[in-house]
Image (cartoon, rainbow, N blue to C red):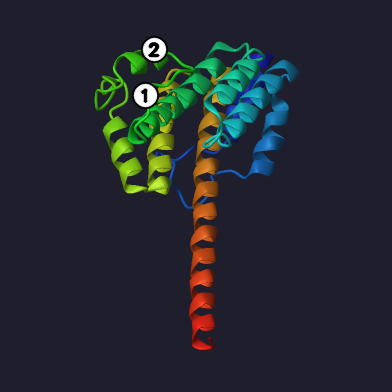
Amino acid sequence: MRSNAYYMLISSLPALPPRLDVDRLPITLERLQARLRMLDPEDAQEIGRMRDILAWSRQFVEADDAAVVKRYGELMQEVTNPLIREVLAAVMDVRMIVAALRRRRHGLGPPTVGFGQWFDHIRRHFNQPDFRLGHAFPGIIRFDQLLGQGDVLNLYRHMLGAVWTYLKKRAEDYVFSFEAVVLYIARWEIMRQWRQLQAERGRAVFEALVTEALGEYAELYS
């Protein structure tokens, strides 16, 4: 039975840490994929769609807004599970807020295209420091400060942290069920994304140091 299979699946997964910024993932991608073979085929497809959209959502930071909205709508048409739709909406809500903050810092007007439950609300309250969303997203002012400082890595940590906190709270409602698997995978993907961002930042810092060192070396013999 499905419930028994998911009891076994959840029991086989190591507990997730209380925070997303950990030194190592509690389970590797390979081991996680092996565990997910216990999923029913239809559920596996839904999890796969969720992971694909989460991966896609990391790639459009500088993309055209209209193109992002169009593609997001196309991808979401294929998602039928209500909780997965909720998880993806939570991710995109934070993206929408940060995109609006960027527009405001660049002296642009309210976004003309967007997605999520807060799009119209943001347009109406665009000139308010927190878009009058402080009750739902206490971190908006901090997002704006980090944008102003150009601290992109910390901005992303706070963005991911906001989604992580929300998903962790939702996970309290489910135990041995498909929904519990959905929330586990979503949080694991957020942890993996943070580690990838750290690694990319580390490479960027290393490359900058190498460039600086080569520049000093060249000057010595110019």
Viewer-nearest residue: 83 or 70: 70
Please state if 80 lies on the left or on the right of 91 as rendered. right
Vertical placement of residue 188 versus 153, above or below: above
Q: Earlier in the sequence, mark 1 or mark 2?
A: 1
Tell me the distance, in whole angstroms, between the alpha carbons under discs 1 and 2.
13 Å
How far from the left and from the top, in percent, is residue 184?
A: 53, 30
Please state if 106 lies on the left or on the right of 141 as rendered. right
Vertical placement of residue 152 versus 205, above or below: above
Instruction: Read off the residue under disc 2.
Output: 120
Identify which residue is drawn at 48% across, 72% down: 212
Answer with the quarter of the image where residue 157 lies: top left
Tell me the element at label 2.
Answer: helix
Instruction: Read off the residue under disc 1.
Output: 109
Identify which residue is drawn at 53% across, 70% down: 211
Q: Alpha-carbon neighbours of circle 2 within 10 Å: few (<14), some, or many (≥20)?
A: some
How far from the left and from the top, in percent, is residue 54?
A: 58, 30
Answer with the quarter of the image where residue 119 lies: top left
Identify which residue is drawn at 52% across, 82% down: 217
How far from the left and from the top, in percent, is residue 169?
A: 39, 24
Q: Quadrant of the N terminus?
A: top right
Viewer-nearest residue: 56 or 64: 64
How far from the left and from the top, in percent, is residue 179?
A: 55, 18
Residue 133 visible here: yes
